[in-house]
Amino acid sequence: MTKLASALRVPAAAAAALLAVTATAPAASAKPEPKAPAEFVALGSVDPTIIQEMRYPTAHDFMGVPVDGYRRPLCILTRPAARALHEAQTRLLRQGYSLKVYDCYRPQRAVDHFVRWAKDLDDQVMKDEFYPRVDKARLFADGYIAEKSGHSRGSTVDLTLVKLPAAPTPPYRPGSEQVPCYAPAAERFPDNSVDMGTGFDCFDTLSHTDDPRVQGVQRVHRQFLKKTLTEAGFVNLAEEWWHYTFKPELFPDTYFDFPVARRSVAGH
């Protein structure tokens, strides 16, 4: 062997060894997902009778796509809020009604998804159902979309009432004909809830809890829901008949970003 061949053999061997180590070394582990603090629980572990129809893991929402951060159709709340809903549910069951939740804890990444969508004025796929009378360019100014949400603090819930026995809600079929969220109940998406005058997440002033145009049985239903939840410690957001926050909040100034997933509250 020549001196040149011998000199080249050492670097070649070293390179081969390095490649072997690289090939067998484990890939760099991804950053672990944050978990919920111990004060958060899955609502079903506190009250399995409350109906859960979580909208944001599905395409049936105002964006028309599943929302970032929702891994499962699961309601997660702070323990005091979940216990208060259980208290309200106990009263309602005796009267032949059940609560149904549409959204509970909402990760900050989901709120960020809403904000990105709101800034994309060309994306109006679900306008005819959810915001037919609102210019998308005004969603921030009119307060329909914001960069922070009380849902991310864990004590806010979007919900309605269902008359028992509960009929099943038909599955949503993307691309189906859209009907305005304030249309008569018989014409809107066939949600199995009582008639509240608008559907959930209806971007319209008719969604204001005490809008004077909402009368009759629709007003009775709204006031029944409000009275029941107020007695359980919740406060309604006046602009949305479905939006309630349990007070006092455990985390009044913290906006969490753990995903909506069972492992986020495993063992709680």
Image (cartoon, rainbow, N blue to C red):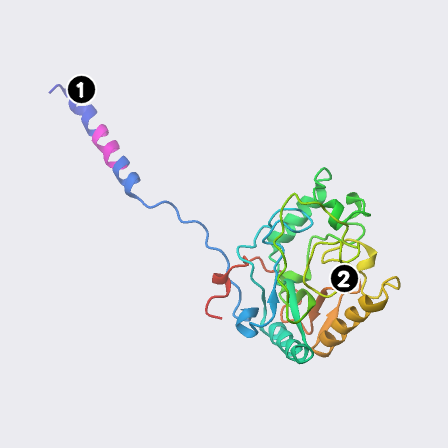
Of helix, strand and loop, which one carries label 1?
helix
- Please name the amino acid that badge 1 sits on: Leu
Q: Position of residue 199 (x, y in %)?
A: 74, 58
- Please name the amino acid that badge 2 sits on: Glu
Range shown magenta: 11-18
The residue where tag 1 is placed is 4
- In front: 182, or 33? 182
The residue under the point 71% across, 42% down is 119
- In front: 95, or 31? 95
Q: Position of residue 65 (x, y in %)?
A: 62, 46
The circle on residue 240 is 2
The reply to whether the magenta stretch includes residue 185 is no
Is most of the magenta stretch helix, strand or loop? helix
Horizontal relation, residue 81 to residue 184: left or right = left
Q: Quadrant of residue 84?
A: bottom right
**Gap in angstroms between the C-alphas marked 1 and 2:** 81 Å
Q: Quadrant of residue 83?
A: bottom right
Q: Is residue 13 above or below residue 107?
A: above
Label 1: few (<14), some or many (≥20) within 10 Å? few
Label 2: few (<14), some or many (≥20) within 10 Å? many
Q: Position of residue 246 (x, y in %)?
A: 68, 72
Horizontal relation, residue 29 to residue 73: left or right = left
Q: Quadrant of residue 226?
A: bottom right
Of helix, strand and loop, which one carries label 2?
loop
